[in-house]
Image: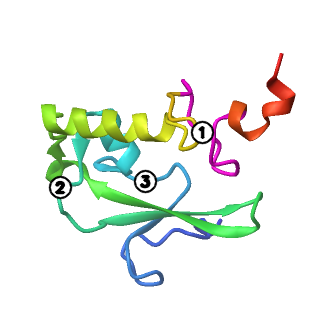
Amino acid sequence: MSPPRFWDPHGERFGLPTYPWRMAPDGYLTRRQLRRRGLRPGGQPVAAQILWRSRRTNSVRAAHLYRTCLAKPVRPMTPARVAALAAANRARRTCPVCGRDAGYVLPAHLGTCLTCAEPAAFAA
């Protein structure tokens, strides 16, 4: 039996150590997996990759892997970052026409709240 199509643990074919879907060795995680564990890559380069063929897009997809031993803890949220995030979310909910907080993120295709976009449809 031949090895799987994307099996290249030494990086000779793909430039990086490459593994098929669900076959990465221990010690390597994606950004999302690191984040779930409270870690971040911390400036380290991509150590390996996972390649797979996507049936949906009919293309080869890739996920970068990072070494867990070199990962650093996630930086804590500072009061300034919390305030900046709250201001950004408030701006996404504020209608530029009527100036009120809609209570939801404004649809990008309308650019305004639903009441301002269709006043006749929502008038009682």
Q: Can the viewer see residue 78?
A: no
- What amino acid does circle 1 point to? Leu
The alpha-carbon separation of the residues under discs 1 and 2 comes to 34 Å
Judge by depth and name the residue closer to the eye, 82 or 98. 98
Judge by depth and name the residue closer to the eye, 34 or 26. 34
Judge by depth and name the residue closer to the eye, 116 or 71. 116
Please give the residue where the numbered disc 2 appears in the rendered image. Answer: 42
Secondary structure state at the residue bearing disc 2: loop
The answer to which of marks 1 and 2 sits earlier in the sequence is 2
- What amino acid does circle 3 point to? Ala
Range covered by the magenta-colored residues: 102-114
| Residue pictured at 36% horizontal, 75% vertical | 10
Secondary structure state at the residue bearing disc 3: loop
| Residue pictured at 48% horizontal, 40% vertical | 92
In the rendering, at what x and y percent does residue 59 appear?
70, 70
Left or right of 86 on screen, residue 40:
left
Please give the residue where the numbered disc 3 appears in the rendered image. Answer: 24
The alpha-carbon separation of the residues under discs 2 and 3 comes to 20 Å
- Residue 97 lies in quadrant: top right
Please give the residue where the numbered disc 1 appears in the rendered image. Answer: 106
In the rendering, at what x and y percent does residue 50 appear?
49, 61
| Residue 112, magenta (yes or no) | yes
| Residue pictured at 46% horizontal, 80% vertical | 14
Q: Can the viewer see residue 86?
A: yes
Left or right of 34 on screen, residue 90:
right
